[in-house]
Image: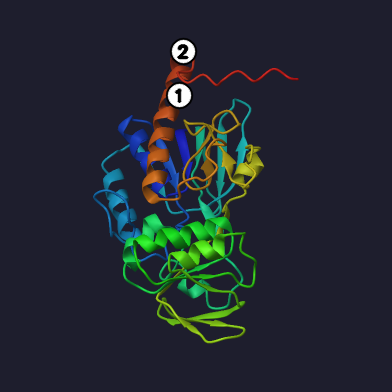
Amino acid sequence: MYDVIIVGGGPAGLAAALTLGRSRRRTLVLDAGEGRNAPAAAVHNFLTRDGTPPAELRRLAHRELAAYPGVELRHAAAADVTRTGDGAFTVAQADGGTAGARRLLLATGVVDELPDVPGLAPLWGRSALHCPYCHGFEVSGRRVAVLGAGPGHVRLALHLLHFTADVALLTGAAPLAAGHRDLLAAHGVAVRAEPVARLEGDGGRLERIRFEGGAPLARDAVFVGGTPRERSGLPEKLGCAPLPDTLTEVDEFGRTSVAGVYAAGDMAHRATLPTPVAAVAAAAAAGTVAGAALDQDLLSEEYGLPGPFPRPAAAPAG
């Protein structure tokens, strides 16, 4: 019986494993190897690791975890989770193996649902991007586009002017809110209103954008707002409360609505944080906090102590 099983071997899961390993907790990490940032050339905005390829970051993490005898890493996917009569958890692996633990941490990540634009998927993570804090510096001085017409897209287009003077907003024939077109024009952001026909490029590098009418637009990068969705069905299977964006709700310590089940990384955030930060550093920080909270949770159980992080009392009805 493990103290904790961590489902997911990305930054959140590995950071939690490090905290638990240093706490001498017997920990199993199940890693299916399906990292959200795998297509990206490098991880950015992560102190001491800025510019590191995602696979190299994972290799370094595995090497560090090997120093802690209580941490076991299995390259396997979790297929199912059930709760036993004593409140523990049994995790069934896709390869047929099983393991049990007193606590469970879900760090299964998300997948990005992309707009249905031909040519976009092969460019994703290389020159079709989503985050100015992860990729903005790399497009400095380049020809950049933003795909979308909502207030967030307008804000992003203006934000990108901090990196380059050549920014275009592609509305796809959707209307802009009142005043936005004049605001963009005043700051030199071009607007193309024709529907986008396809993105063209080679080797992960965008070269041009073609429209259903009008001349093509030469671009080096395009920023696209994908929709993150839960990668795993385990949170729903366990009954974890979801947020309106379908991701898993947690408190500031990574606790879900289900006793003994924690969650961390891109798949989970607090209800009071409407725009979660999707970054490797943020995921790792969430994993570290959840790992410490798990250790304290187990400590309370072992010595009959009250929980160190009491949940707030429910508001009275009516």
Secondary structure found at label 1: helix
* Amino acid at the residue labelled 2: Leu
Q: On the image, numbered disc 2 is attached to which residue?
A: 305
Residue shown at 51% from the left, 19% from the top: 310
Evaluate if marks 2 and 1 touch, with contact meaning CB atoms under 8 Å apart. Answer: no
Three-letter code for the amino acid on which mark 1 is drawn = Leu
Vertical arrangement, residue 303 with respect to residue 111, above or below: above
Q: Give the residue number, with chain letter if any, for mark 1.
A: 298
Residue at screen point 53% across, 87% down:
215
Vertical arrangement, residue 144 with respect to residue 137, above or below = below
Is residue 222 depicted above or below 183 in this figure?
Answer: below
Q: Position of residue 191 (x, y in %)?
A: 53, 72
Query: In this rendering, does residue 223 appear at all?
Result: no
Which residue is nearer to you in this view: 141 or 197? Answer: 141
Residue at image x 27%, y 46%?
64
Secondary structure category for the residue under label 2: loop
The crowding category of the residue bearing disc 1, from other C-alpha atoms within 10 Å (few below 14, some 14 to 19, many at least 20), is some
Image quarter of residue 136: bottom left
Residue 25 seen in the figure: yes
Query: Which is more N-terminal, label 1 or label 2?
Result: 1
Q: As drawn, which residue projects farthest toward the left?
A: 48
Comparing 177 with 182, the one in front is 182
**Would you say 84 lies left or right of 34 here?**
right
Farthest residue to the right: give it. 318
Q: Is residue 223 above or below residue 245?
A: below
On the image, the x and y values in percent for residue 142 come to 35, 73
Q: Nearer the viewer, residue 258 or 149?
A: 149
Mark-to-mark CA distance, 2 and 1: 10 Å
Q: Return the x and y of residue 45 as percentages of the image width and height.
A: 32, 52
